[in-house]
Image (cartoon, grey):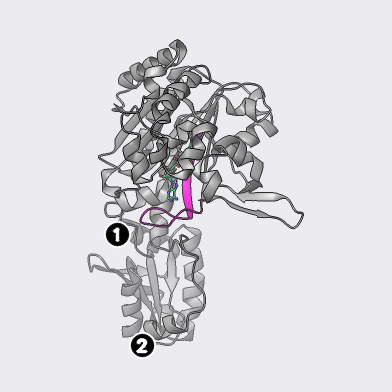
Amino acid sequence: MTRNARLKHRMKYKTLKGFQDILPPDILIWQNIETISRDVFRTYGYQEIRLPILESTDIFVRSIGETSDIVEKEMYTFQDKGGRSVTLRPEGTASFVRAYVEHHLYNHPAPQKYYYMGPMFRYERPQAYRYRQFYQIGAEAMGVEDPKLDAEIISMLTKILSGIGLKELNFELTSIGCKNCRPDYRDALKNFLRDKLNSFCSDCQRRYDLNPLRILDCKVPDCISSRQGAPQVIDYLCADCKKHFDGLRHYLDILKVPHSITPNLVRGLDYYTKTAFEVTSESLGSQKAVAAGGRYDGLVDEFGGPPTPGIGFAIGMERIIPLIKDSMKPSEGPDLFICCMGQYAYEEALALAEQLRARRLWVEINYDDSSLKSQMRKGNRIGAKHVIVIGEDEVRNEVAVIKDMITGTETQSRLEAQELVKIIKAGS
Ligand code: HAM
């Protein structure tokens, strides 16, 4: 039995199903994506907002919708020690709107633009690209109803995705109407479904009266086939929604954002009005949405704030990383590894390492009395870009040889931070 196999056998604790650790070097890819996103957000005037992970359960029930899969089946809800029902956030928009109203952010000039990054929790059946804890990068823009803002935020999303290096994505767009046109559509849909109701699952039969639009989101194969030919909301838009949708498409063309209309796009959250979209990748199989979002013009009002339109999106980190992992190679190792022979050398190396780190280099030193050969091997294994050997002679003469591990070039240098930095920077 190998050492790893033996230890695995003894291992007592593991991550929960659907949860994962994100370790180096992969974390460098995560950080890279976050940096690229922050840069794009800044140019569009989005500011970061950090929201709690735990919220009152009501916040999600009221906004995402009582009959949505998320609220019905997927929330991590429990009672805290004070007997309150609390929920680990399954998404960011509801928490964001709660904060927007709580802090009267609507008093600031519109549009107010915010972004967030962090974990979300849904008790879904784990499978490839679907986790129970997953990370989103989200953005929300408040206070402007005009489709110019929809086009701008969508364009920003495409900038982030292309900046990260994602290619061959489909941008699927639709309008799902508003509270004025939705009742007509709801009636048309119910008329269509009425005679076929027996062929739907029991959940859908229950949804027929409560929220028939949710039937369009059911994943049960019989329900999918039975709803073929159902009327589409895009054909029932009121004049205002239609004008808004046409405007959005016009501005997307001006901004050269390629998109396709997917009339039967169904979002899993009930708060959407008008614009709804998903960005998908065929490489991801059944969990193909890498990002999604839409408008939610009624939500601030619903949360007790003044009627304020809003629009946003969220990108799923675990969905984009597999698509770029090969092209975004994480940077591998320290700028310098210091091999040390003898006590004097260690004293010199410790102080030198501090000076080099103060000049922003990543420096590692050896800590034990192993042979020079084994220390060199270690430098190689950790991917050091340069290695320097310090022994008693080097300390006495105040010079040492620094080796560029990529080119093999050896350069003599004084044991002095500034000179070493110059050599290392020239090499990297
Ligand atoms: P959503 O479509 O539920 O929208 O999620 C957005 C993205 O999060 C999905 O497209 C997907 O990439 C990722 N995602 C969702 N569930 C999982 C999961 N179980 N495992 C891995 N990734 C997942 C929202 O959450 C809305 N709050 C977006 C929004 C913001 N709309 C307006 N503003």
Q: Which mark is residue 371?
A: 2
Please tell me whether mark 1 sits on a helix, a strand or a loop.
Answer: helix
Please tell me whether mark 2 sits on a helix, a strand or a loop.
Answer: loop
User: The disc labelled 1 sits on which kind of residue?
Assistant: Gly
Q: Which mark is residue 184?
A: none
- Does residue 55 show up? yes
Q: Residue at x 38, y 46 (%)?
A: 220
Query: Residue 59, image x and y in percent?
Result: 63, 39
Q: Which mark is residue 427?
A: 1
Label 2 with label 1: CB-CB less than 8 Å? no
Foreground of the two, 335 or 347 = 335
Query: Residue 398, image x and y in percent?
Result: 41, 74
Quadrant where the N terminus is found in the figure? bottom left
Foreground of the two, 11 or 153 = 11
Residue 125, magenta (yes or no)? yes
Foreground of the two, 83 or 329 = 83
> What's the magenta region?
122-140
Residue 26, magenta (yes or no)? no
User: The disc labelled 2 sits on which kind of residue?
Assistant: Ser
Label 2 vs label 1, nearer the camera: 2
Residue 151 vs 2, above or below: the answer is above
Quadrant where the C terminus is found in the figure? bottom left
